[in-house]
Image (cartoon, coloured by chain):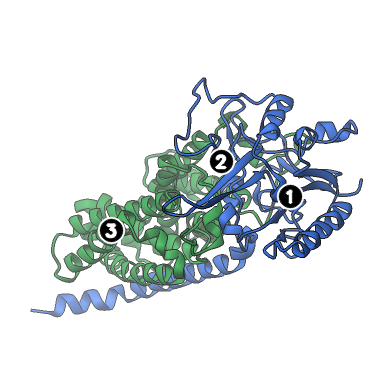
Amino acid sequence: MNTPPSSTFFSAPPDWGWLIVLYFFVGGLAGGSYFLAVLIDFFGRPEDRPLARLGYYISFPCIILSGLLLTLDLTRPERFWHMLFDAHSFSPMFKAWSPMSIGSWALTIFGLFSLLSFLSALAEAGRLKWPAARRIRAPGVLGGVLSVLGGLLGFFVAGYTGVLLSVTNRPIWSDTPLLGMLFVVSAASISAALMLLLVGKSGGKMPGVRALHRMDAWVVVLELIVLVAVVISLGPGARAVMNSWGVLLLVGVVLIGMLAPLALYWRNLNATAAAVLVLVGGFILRLVIVFSAQGV
Amino acid sequence: MAEPMGFYTDTTVCIGCKACEVACKEWNQLPSTNGGQNTLSGDSYDNTRALDGIHWRHVKFVEQFTDDRKDGRWLLMSDVCKHCVNAPCLEVCPTNAIIRTEFDTVVIQSDTCNGCRDCIAACPFGVIEINPVSGTAQKCTLCYDRLQGGLEPACSKACPTQSIQFGTIRELRGRAQKRVDQLQQMGEKRAYLYGADDKMLGGLNSFYLLVDKPEVYGLPPDPKMPTRNLKMGSWFSALGAIVVGLMGVINFRNRGTSENAGEGRP
């Protein structure tokens, strides 16, 4: 009998499928684009404010979609609120050591922040006639506090999913403590890519677009380094990806999602294509991580 | 709290009759087939194959045969939830559907579970699955309802060879150690106890007497708590966030200078 490389190989797959892959992607976009928008608000120029607003426009619909996807994935969706309140006593349900428990609260609270920033961005752009909403936009004191807290929560939402996978007993997921880090970095890279894609031609006037473009390239390099560290940290457990999933990881994520866009960026070629490739790679990354561990 | 109760399963006397599986299904009103589909494994007398939401007991048939099939043996083992003292499923459950009872057993409350399936990924033994009838995660309750009524669990009651024994953990551990000593004296030097002390997940309240490596029975040699990765995972995530944040600050700050430099090029 073939001795499994790790004790994690005796657990059962939880059947987290396409809905979860999609959630990991959309949730990463929600948190990442909010964080980037906050960075631009604080360190960008006044001309960059439309770019920051774009980040908030992406974040809110994505976090709503995240909640829907997660609820749909439950086998008893009507009981989604059991994550937040005790089913019998109705007192708040919170377990600080369970990533799914903290994550449920983080999603809910971040959703509120995301909504407020979304409304304030709309008001600033003149699309929403609500003067009060403009006041919760950075750099005012209230807006500043909202942005900083929201940005931190955004990163939490983007990263906790990776920690959640590590806090199980499945192969790959729990054989490395680095998945949270990988998801955080990847959330930044896909969010920057989506913002660059959506800003389109109107971005030419904004100096922040160039900066975001360059930052995305840096983050993709960082993501590649973290991905290599993840595979190394798996040790003998890496056997679980030494199959067609590993090939998809190499071709779909490293080659198409990281090296190709870097080359395009380096040569100052098609920036749109580079952004699309980063998004495709980010999706395949989550696909491989979710499904490969369950095929074991 | 009552004294901790559990199972001691002596695999050396299991005859693979599956009376435990049947008794479990009868008492707990679990469907005999999944949606009317009666699937046969086709290569083994074991047609249950694994524990899941409608199989809370599973008699494993480990078939060890030589290639020419002239020599061989069956290792039979009635598998069940281990009712770990430090239970990984209970640890991660975000709804508190999984509780520890007054008998020190682990029970999933079906009216609370919302089917997030985190416990399935957390259980190092692959015990839990979704029951398609209730749509919730289910597993052995160590017959919590029978225990509350002063009865012993259905499976151990039905076991004709006393392979499955029910009792207080203290008493079962003593009985199991005597049996190991007896087997050792009789020449079965491979006999040992799996999960009978506090080292494995704080102790398994359903522990086993085995005569081969745990892997052979499909048991993890070194099961761990899921939260072992929590601290490191969180720190690394924070580190990732800080590095990405710094990259953002540097790029948005330097934007002006590098932009000017770009414009200065011919």
Task: Identify the element where label 3 is drawn.
Answer: helix
Q: Please tell me whether residue B149 is drawn above or below residue B246 in the rendered image.
A: above
Q: Is residue B137 or residue A27 the one in the foreground?
A: B137
Horizontal placement of B56 versus A278: left or right?
A: right
Read off the residue under disc 3. A247
Read off the residue under disc 1. B10
Residue, far top: B36
Q: Are marks 2 and 1 in contact (CB under 8 Å)?
A: no
N-terminal-most mark, 2 or 1: 1
Horizontal placement of B3 versus A290: left or right?
A: right
Q: Chain of mark 2?
A: B
**Closer to us: mark 2 or mark 1?**
1
The colour one sees for chain B in the rendered image is: blue
Gap between marks 2 and 1 measured at Cα: 19 Å
Residue, far left: B266
Read off the residue under disc 2. B50
Type of amino acid at the residue the image marks with label 2: Ala
Gap between marks 2 and 3 measured at Cα: 30 Å
Task: Identify the element where label 1 is drawn.
Answer: strand
Horizontal placement of A65 versus A112: left or right?
A: left
